[in-house]
Image (cartoon, rainbow, N blue to C red):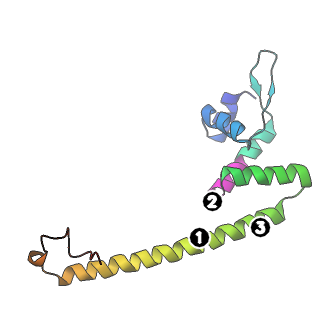
Amino acid sequence: MRIGELAQRAGLSTKALRFYEQAGVLPRPARTASGYRDYDETALARLGFVRAAQSAGLTLAEIRMIIEVREDQGRPCEHVADLLDRHVAALDQRIAELQATRAEVHRLRERATSLDPSACGEDGVCHVIPTG
């Protein structure tokens, strides 16, 4: 199938398909005698995998590595599990950071309700957010 048909079936633009080829997550297709890209059904399945992996938070570089493991060593399930473990750990750390930030924002908001705006000095920007 030509690039336009693949794009339509995958719900992507032709520009996105070319980008995925360049990124190494979609193999370069065969070419017709007239030079058009000629994709087979495996390209559609690969795009489904790429999009699902991106939805799980994997980068294109990680996805490319999974594909390379699959092509070189066979089933990449253990590699994928390790990647997902690292992503879970990073998410847990980010969630903890966000919770700490949220707590600080709540603290500052509570502080704002107890301060008199007229007492805000000329030497700073806003006394709700202390500088030191």
The residue under label 1 is 91
Residue 95 horizontal side relative to residue 111, left or right: right
The answer to which quarter of the image holds residue 75 is: bottom right
Residue at mark 2? 57
Precedes in sequence: disc 3 or disc 1: 3
Q: Is residue 50 left or right of residue 70?
A: left
Q: Horizontal and vertical percent for residue 79?
A: 80, 63
Outermost residue to the top: 34
Decide: is 87 above or below 22: below
Q: CA distance from mark 3 to mark 1?
A: 15 Å
Task: Name the chief secondary structure element in magenta.
Answer: helix
**Outermost residue toward the left?**
118
Q: How many marks?
A: 3
Q: Going 73% across and 44% down the picture, which residue do you hit?
A: 25
Secondary structure type for disc 3: helix
Rounded to the nearest whole Å, what is the CA distance between mark 2 and mark 3?
13 Å
**Mark 2 vs 1: CB contact within 8 A:** yes
Q: Residue at x 22, y 78 (%)?
A: 112
On whether residue 55 falls in the magenta region, the answer is yes
Mark found first going from the N terminus, 2 or 1: 2
* Amino acid carrying mark 2 in the image: Gly
Instruction: Give left or right: position of 117 versus 111.
Output: left
Q: Residues within 10 Å of mark 1 (few under 14, many from 20)?
A: few
Q: Residues within 10 Å of mark 3 (few under 14, many from 20)?
A: few
Residue type for callout 3: Ala
72 relative to 127 in the view: left or right:
right
Circle 3 is placed at which residue position? 81
Using the image, determine if residue 95 lies above or below residue 37.
below
